[in-house]
Image (cartoon, grey):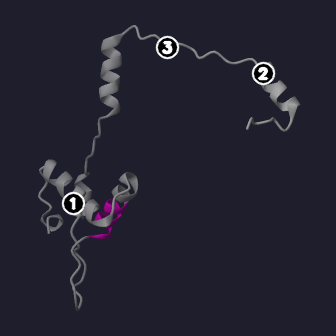
Amino acid sequence: MAKVASNPQKSKRKSNRKKKKKSVYRVRNWSAYNESLKQRGSLTFWFDEEVIKKWSYEGPTQRGAQYVYSDLAIQTGLIFRKLFNLPLRQTEGFLSSLITLMKLSLDSCLD
């Protein structure tokens, strides 16, 4: 069964439109282009000294379970969780491996 256009004017208008030509981008400097592609996949993370100092919880002790992470550490983890769309346990593993790669000594992160 052939499909019939419900509005013949509409199909006529589509055929009368001028199609835009795609502009062709020619690479002339391949070494710079190659470096830009490498840079596009690069990730750079750093923790400020203030963040490293405030990573562990240093508040008053309370009854029950003790706090391990500071609010700053929890917020950092939640930002990475949202950024990379990770579940909670994977976010914790990601932060743990990131801290290991950065050779930081944040003992409370490696539970």
Q: Give the range drawn in magenta.
A: 70-78
User: In this rendering, which labeled residue sits more in front, label 3 or label 2?
Assistant: 2
Number of the label disc, if any, that sits on residue 93 = 1
Does residue 90 appear left or right of residue 27 in this picture? left
Q: Is mark 2 on a helix, strand or loop?
A: helix
Q: Quarter of the image containing the N terminus?
A: top right
Q: How far apart are marks 2 and 1 (CA)?
A: 56 Å
Q: Percent from the top left, x then y, of residue 8?
A: 87, 31
Q: Distance between the residues labelled 1 and 3?
A: 42 Å
Whether 99 is among the magenta residues is no
Does residue 50 appear left or right of residue 11 in this picture? left
Contact between marks 1 and 3 (CB within 8 A): the answer is no
Q: Which residue is drawn at 81% across and 29% down?
A: 11
Q: Residues within 10 Å of mark 3 (few under 14, many from 20)?
A: few
Identified by mark 2, the residue type is: Ser
| Mark closer to the chain start, 1 or 3 | 3
Q: Percent from the top left, x then y, of residue 65?
A: 22, 85
Q: Main secondary structure of the magenta part?
A: helix
User: Dot 2 corresponds to which residue?
Assistant: 15
Identified by mark 1, the residue type is: Gly
